């Protein structure tokens, strides 16, 4: 059913304050009601207006008639043996999105989605294969934090310390919702800007907008290849925003000061792990003082690639370190629960849903000539076999 109320979860704190002040003034209520409600929304993360127990019942009912706290419901919760927890959330219109809680010794990171599906079509990504459904609203982005925060506290995981926009979707392709959501999480829920990372495959106008923001949100670039031709086979957006253009935007972002850039480099055996690529990667990283995460590829349905061998990943690490680049090999988390972006949703989708999103076409494409031509050999030793083209 269409929500005709104003969703308080999608408004920045200033707008919440304005809307509430008007509402309570019109009802002849004292102004402190505004702060009472804001506290319930941003500090207590109460799931329903009925739970705002220091408001008279009549005020709760009047508030409820005009405003909502629209949260998704949990469709599936999967816990990994390594502590990673993936939620598949069902939105009000039935769309499914994912978020992941990733505990480490000193932090609890929440990975959130910015779109239902994704239109970018990256060939290594389960979400990319399943196609785009729709943009999320700022409230739908923020509500993932609220429901995950409550779940984490209720289940002994503690407080969420960091947020990464690395779930389903390209956040910089949904800037209308991204920017308010950043403000809400930062100013409303008190998550420090340096603890929030926006991850992109290289939407240059969005990077420039982030550089112009005063807050020091962090930026992760899904680079995955340091050369344009190879990168365009993994990330179709490369054809629109080349590495050269991307680097120019990153230089500006870097010069804005105090904002760390991370390069994500998924290592796929025989595709992007040729040793000659490591110095090129190091050069790009050094240009913008980027930290590099080397990530062994997490296999997905529809794609028969595998992770680079451990010794190749270590060789990359050595080259980067020798050139003064900070680098880490990121241990994939939650492999036993399909925790890579889009995987749980892909496996959860019913056959009819799959047909609706052209997965059937992807399946067929996977058996096409380009896919079968891939030999698994190091591309330095054989012709680089192109990853599958996404069907139009
Ligand atoms: S890697 Fe990110 S941008 Fe690319 S298809 Fe997956 S979700 Fe979309």
Image (cartoon, rainbow, N blue to C red):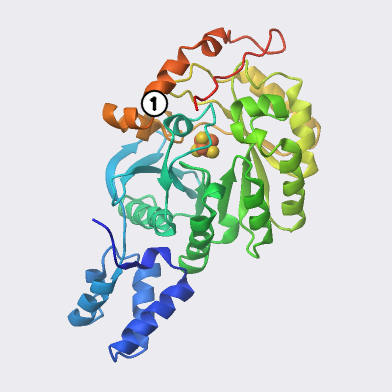
Q: Is 375 located above or below residue 95 in the figure?
A: above
Q: Residue furthest front?
A: 392
Residue 360 relative to residue 126: left or right: left
The quarter of the rendered structure image containing the N terminus is bottom left
Q: Position of residue 248 (x, y in %)?
A: 77, 46
Q: Position of residue 90 (x, y in %)?
A: 30, 46
Residue 80 seen in this snapshot = no
Residue carrying label 1: 359
The residue lying at 72 percent from left, 36 percent from top is 243
Label 1 CB-ligand 1 distance < 8 A:
no
Residue 208 relative to residue 131: left or right: right
Q: Quadrant of residue 212?
A: bottom right
The residue lying at 53 percent from left, 18 percent from top is 306
Residue 284 relative to residue 190: left or right: right
The residue lying at 47 percent from left, 69 percent from top is 12
Q: Residues within 10 Å of mark 1 (few under 14, many from 20)?
A: some
Q: Is 354 located above or below residue 133 in the figure?
A: above
Count of marks placed on residues: 1
Q: Position of residue 238 (x, y in %)?
A: 65, 34
Residue 362 seen in this snapshot = yes
The residue lying at 54 percent from left, 31 percent from top is 122
Q: Nearer the viewer, residue 229 or 140?
A: 229
Instruction: Indicate the secondary structure of the residue bearing disc 1.
Output: helix
Q: Quadrant of residue 19?
A: bottom left
């Amino acid at each position: 059913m269409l929500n005709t109320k104003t969703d308080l979860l999608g408004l920045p704190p200033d707008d919440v304050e304005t809307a509430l002040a008007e509402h309570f003034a019109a009802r002849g209520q004292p102004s402190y009601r505004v702060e009472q409600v804001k506290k319930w929304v941003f500090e207590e993360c109460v799931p329903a207006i009925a739970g705002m127990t220091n408001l008279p019942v009549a005020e709760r009912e009047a508030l409820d008639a005009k405003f909502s706290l629209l949260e998704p419901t949990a469709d599936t919760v999967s816990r990994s043996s390594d502590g990673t927890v993936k939620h598949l959330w069902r939105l009000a219109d039935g769309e499914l999105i994912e978020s992941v809680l990733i505990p480490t010794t000193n932090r609890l990171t929440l990975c959130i989605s910015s779109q239902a599906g994704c239109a970018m079509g990256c060939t290594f990504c389960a979400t990319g294969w399943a196609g785009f459904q729709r943009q999320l609203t700022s409230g739908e982005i923020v509500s993932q934090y609220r429901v995950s925060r409550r779940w984490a506290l209720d289940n002994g995981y503690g407080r969420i310390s960091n947020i990464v926009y690395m779930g389903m979707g390209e956040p910089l392709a949904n800037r209308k919702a991204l920017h308010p959501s950043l403000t809400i999480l930062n100013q409303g829920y008190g998550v420090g800007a340096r603890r929030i990372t926006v991850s992109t495959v290289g939407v240059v106008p969005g990077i420039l907008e982030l550089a112009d923001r005063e807050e020091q949100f962090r930026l992760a670039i899904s680079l995955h290849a340091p050369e344009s031709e190879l990168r365009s086979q993994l990330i179709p957006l490369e054809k629109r925003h080349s590495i050269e253009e991307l680097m120019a935007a990153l230089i500006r972002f870097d010069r804005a000061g105090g904002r760390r850039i991370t390069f994500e480099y998924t290592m796929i055996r025989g595709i992007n792990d040729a040793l000659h690529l490591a110095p090129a990667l190091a050069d790009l990283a050094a240009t913008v003082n980027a930290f590099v995460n080397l990530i062994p590829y997490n296999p997905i349905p529809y794609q028969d690639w595998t992770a680079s061998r451990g010794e190749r990943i270590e060789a990359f690490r050595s080259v980067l370190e020798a050139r003064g680049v900070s680098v880490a090999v990121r241990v994939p988390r939650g492999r036993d629960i399909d925790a890579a972006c889009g995987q749980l949703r892909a496996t959860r989708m019913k056959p009819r849903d799959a047909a609706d999103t052209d997965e059937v076409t992807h399946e067929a494409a996977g058996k096409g000539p380009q896919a079968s031509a891939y030999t698994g050999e190091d591309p330095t030793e054989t012709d680089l076999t192109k990853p599958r083209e996404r069907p139009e």
